[in-house]
């Protein structure tokens, strides 16, 4: 129960990043008093003024309407003074070895002062299996054995994070003590979702295994798509036919240019390293990573089959973020693709409605509009399935391009419509012109080059 009001628990959130702010805003929206603590002074100052440092649909509005229930601070003592439950939502980026960097987690633990009553530290950050045990030991060693520990991983996807928090498929709560698990479960009682109560190790593994499995599905369907390209099958039809099998299900079977973002690449690698460090070689995950790396580069092969050498060719990269409805470019396919094209000597003209690409893709020209990006281009590559790109196969675009060639890395467009509009068109795992109506032969027909 709350130290302050005697009713709802008071929640502290450590880390005003994407997971922390979504978690804080959603708990505030559920009626909890929430204190957000971060170590970056500018971030706290901005949040006090209602400025959210990244784009997540609905978040700015949610923070604004719950402003009176929220407090932002740099001061750890202030953050914990009245808190009953302390959520750790700091970043755990990959190190060079592929392990998770837990320094921000340890910084939180090291700073914790002794607390009144039984406060509970709740780990939302994605951490290796076994972290909870180590944190428990560190707390005990510091004389903080009165602080409980619970693992409560997040399953929020960028772009839909608020909905994912409020309407989750499940809430996972892993505890060392039954009563701690009950208190954390109770925070979610207004949310209609099954609560999976586990031990701490299993909760940590559920998070990593879920992300690794979703990534595996994507690499699997991407390999199916690549085989479709050389056999004449259509991966969209294949995915539909597979997904209707309830044992398989329809989700995460969209073939494309590969997965990116701050989670899948990091977590697949972290699970592989975790297994390796424990003496087990997780072969499947090595393949998932390899397939994903190759998938980003296959576009270059498709371009060269149409254009020959890419030196001095102009290529429009349309979409830079790792998926739509975010401004996040971390591990985006656009970075690898753009860098490869620049290395081949191509001129890269890039467009994205949200990304701030300054620190990525040095040497590319960033354009304000789609039309500016395709001006004089020998090919346009769709990397992110932004809605704005649905009308790409237009007369204006065709006339602006030097060669009307579209490579659709997300199967966003209708092949028949694009070809009828006078473009040469390549996509992922759907029949090329050569295959339309017949199977067999090579997927990419270089004779289609319209120039
Ligand atoms: C992912 C998970 O979906 C969340 O459940 C999880 O909480 C989050 O990671 C995390 O660990 O924090 P996110 O990275 O935001 O969320 O994005 P996703 O929507 O899962 O997409 C990841 C990547 O896979 C994107 O590049 C997307 O384009 C790609 N993708 C997704 C495909 O290529 N095909 C698909 O069928 C689905």
Image (cartoon, helix red, strand yellow):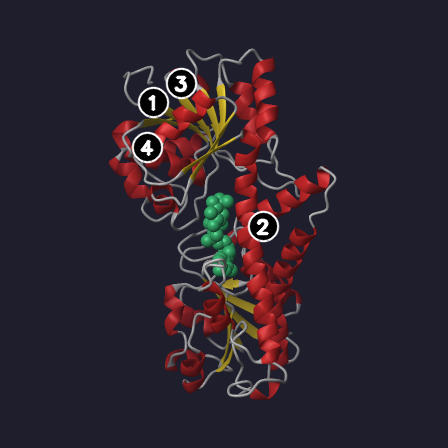
**Residue 55, above or below 408:** above
Q: Please give the residue where the numbered disc 3 appears in the rendered image.
A: 78
Q: Residue furthest right?
A: 279
Q: Is mark 2 within 8 Å of ligand 1?
A: no
Residue at x-position 30% and y-position 15%: 4
Measured Cα–Cα span from mark 2 to mark 3? 36 Å
Measured Cα–Cα span from mark 3 to mark 1? 16 Å
Residue 330 image offset from top left, x and y in percent: 53, 50
Measured Cα–Cα span from mark 2 to mark 4? 32 Å
Numbered disc total? 4
Sequence-first disc among 2 and 1: 1
Measured Cα–Cα span from mark 2 to mark 1? 35 Å
Q: Please give the residue where the numbered disc 2 appears in the rendered image.
A: 265
**Residue 198, above or below 318:** above
Q: Please give the residue where the numbered disc 1 appears in the rendered image.
A: 9
Asked if the residues shown at circle 3 and circle 1 are in contact, with their CB atoms under 8 angstroms apart, the answer is no
Residue 87 image offset from top left, x and y in percent: 44, 28
Residue 190 image offset from top left, x and y in percent: 30, 35
Q: Please give the residue where the numbered disc 4 appears in the rendered image.
A: 189
Sequence-first disc among 2 and 4: 4
Secondary structure at badge 3 equals: helix
Q: In this view of the protein, which residue sits in the foreground, 191 or 405?
A: 191
Measured Cα–Cα span from mark 4 to mark 3? 27 Å
Sequence-first disc among 4 and 1: 1
Sequence-first disc among 4 and 3: 3
Which corner quadrant holds the C terminus?
bottom right
Graded by Cα atoms within 10 Å as few (under 14), some (14 to 19) or many (20 or more), the crowding at tag 1 reads many
**Residue 241, above or below 192:** below
Which label belongs to residue 94? none
Graded by Cα atoms within 10 Å as few (under 14), some (14 to 19) or many (20 or more), the crowding at tag 4 reads few
């Amino acid at each position: 129960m709350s130290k302050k009001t005697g009713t709802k628990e008071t929640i502290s959130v450590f880390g005003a990043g994407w997971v922390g702010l979504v978690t804080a805003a959603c708990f505030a929206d559920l009626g909890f008093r929430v204190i957000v603590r971060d170590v970056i002074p500018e971030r706290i100052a901005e949040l006090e003024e209602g400025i959210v440092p990244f784009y997540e649909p609905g978040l700015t509005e949610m923070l604004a309407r719950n402003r009176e229930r929220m407090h932002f601070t740099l001061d750890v003592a202030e953050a914990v003074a009245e808190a009953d439950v302390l959520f750790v939502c700091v970043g755990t980026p990959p190190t060079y070895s592929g392990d998770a960097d837990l320094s921000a987690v340890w910084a939180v633990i090291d700073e914790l002062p002794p607390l009144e009553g039984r406060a509970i530290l709740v780990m939302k950050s994605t951490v290796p299996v076994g972290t909870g045990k180590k944190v428990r030991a560190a707390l005990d060693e510091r004389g903080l054995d009165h602080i409980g520990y619970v693992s409560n991983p997040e399953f929020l996807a960028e772009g839909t994070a608020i909905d994912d928090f409020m309407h989750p498929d499940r809430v996972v709560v892993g505890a060392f003590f039954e009563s701690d698990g009950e208190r954390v479960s109770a925070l979610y009682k207004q949310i209609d979702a099954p609560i999976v109560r586990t031990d701490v190790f299993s909760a940590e593994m559920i998070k990593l295994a879920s992300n690794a499995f979703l990534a595996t599905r994507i690499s699997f369907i991407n390999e199916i798509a690549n085989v479709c390209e050389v056999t004449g099958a259509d991966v969209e039809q294949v995915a539909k036919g597979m997904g209707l099998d309830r044992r398989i299900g329809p989700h995460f079977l969209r073939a494309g240019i590969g997965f990116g973002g701050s989670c899948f690449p990091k977590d697949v690698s972290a699970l592989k390293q975790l297994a390796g460090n424990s003496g087990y070689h997780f072969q499947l995950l090595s393949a998932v990573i390899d397939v994903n790396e190759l998938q980003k580069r296959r576009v270059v092969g498709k371009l060269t089959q149409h254009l020959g050498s890419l030196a001095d060719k102009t290529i429009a990269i349309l979409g830079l973020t790792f998926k739509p409805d975010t401004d996040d470019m971390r591990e985006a396919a656009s970075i690898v693709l753009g860098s490869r094209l620049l290395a081949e000597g191509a001129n890269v003209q890039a467009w994205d409605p949200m990304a701030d690409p300054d620190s990525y893709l040095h040497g590319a020209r960033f354009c304000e509009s789609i039309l500016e990006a395709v001006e004089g281009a020998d090919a346009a590559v769709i990397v992110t399935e932004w809605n704005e790109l649905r009308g790409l196969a237009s007369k204006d675009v065709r006339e602006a391009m030097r060669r009307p060639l579209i490579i659709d890395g997300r199967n966003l467009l209708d092949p028949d419509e694009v070809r009828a509009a006078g473009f040469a068109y390549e996509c992922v795992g759907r029949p090329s012109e050569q295959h339309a109506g017949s199977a067999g032969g090579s997927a990419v027909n270089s004779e289609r080059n319209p120039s």
